[in-house]
Amino acid sequence: MKESTKHRILIVEDEMIIAADLSMQLTDIGYEVIGIQTKAEDAINTLSINKPDLVLMDINLAGTMDGIEAAKHILENFQIPVIFITSNTDDASFQRALEAKPYAFVTKPFQIDKLARNLKIALGHLERQNSQVEENSDHVTTLDDRLFIRQKEKMVKVNISDILFLKADRNYCKIFTIEKEFLVSTALTVIEKEISSRKFIRVHRSYVVNITKIDAIGENREYFIMKEHNVPISRRSKEEVFRHLKFI
């Protein structure tokens, strides 16, 4: 049975015969395949200009980045769901792959019926998640020293000085304050601009922190401790972050 609305899928698979067969079968059941990439780096470049609804990702890829690393990057930067397709089912690989928060695993050789069910579950979950975000927290208004966040039928005041950090999570943003956590459908980059000041700095693709709320610095300067939270510092951002904090 074909999909009534065509969802767009990117295939990342380094075996072209498998990828081409998969593309044809997905097209036959009503999905739109926006492309096939054999390397993670090329897939990420594709996402920058042509965003699909879901990525089918092989774990074992040639190149400098494997499928798990690519899926983590996609989660952090594009918030696009990933389903892993793999012949590698050992426990170590499975545990490592879980860190990328995939929506499902499908083992090779796969059956199209099983894959189609996983696609429907993943896309259905994404649609419900989007609906929940729109219903529960669909707007943020900024004044000089505070945010007003829509929570169902009311606007809740959040003092900017009370914010610990912001976290991008898939297609929404979480605002962590001293006492509470808020979910908003506004992108992290938008809120970051709204509260822009020397007190808030980007420490990771997915995190912006209030430097006045840092309680401690973790081992090897890899994370900040803020209340009960450990906020990661990316290797790419570390030098700039600590220069901003005036650490030697």
Image: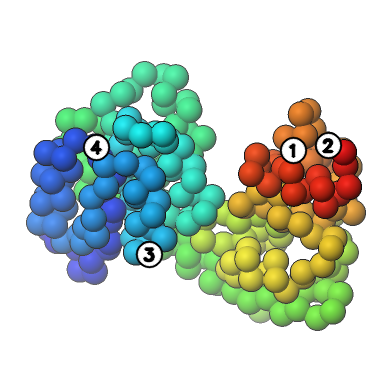
Task: Write the residue at 57% across / 62% down.
Answer: 172
Q: CA distance from mark 3 to mark 1?
A: 32 Å
Q: Which residue is mark 3?
A: 49
Q: Residue at x 48, y 68 (%)?
A: 131
Could you tell me if the residues under marks 1 and 2 are in contact, i.e. CB atoms within 8 Å? yes
Residue 35 left/right relative to 160: left
Front in this rendered view, residue 183 or 161: 161
Circle nearer the N terminus (4, 3):
4
Residue bearing the label numbered 1: 223
Q: Amino acid at mark 1?
A: Tyr
Q: Nearer the viewer, mark 2 or mark 3?
A: 3
Query: What whole-number distance in Å separates the C-alpha atoms at marks 1 and 2?
Result: 6 Å
Q: Name the secondary structure under disc 3.
A: helix
- Using the rendered image of the protein, determine whether residue 149 is visible from the camera's viewpoint: no
Q: Are marks 4 and 1 in contact (CB under 8 Å)?
A: no
Of the numbered discs 2 and 3, the one sitting upstream in the chain is 3
Q: Earlier in the sequence, mark 4 or mark 2?
A: 4
The Cα atoms of the two marked residues, 4 and 3, are separated by 21 Å
Task: Name the amino acid, label 2.
Answer: Ile
Q: Earlier in the sequence, mark 3 or mark 1?
A: 3
Q: Which mark is residue 14?
A: 4
Crowdedness near tag 4: few (<14), some (14–19) or many (≥20) residues, C-alpha within 10 Å: some
The alpha-carbon separation of the residues under discs 2 and 3 comes to: 37 Å
Q: Which quadrant does the N terminus fall into?
A: bottom left
Residue 51 vertical position relative to residue 209 in the rendered view, above or below:
below
Disc sitting over residue 217 in the figure: 2
- In the rendering, at what x and y percent does residue 73 appear? 49, 46
Q: Nearer the viewer, mark 4 or mark 2?
A: 4
Q: Would you place residue 236 above or below residue 175 in this image?
A: above
- Label 3 amino acid? Ile
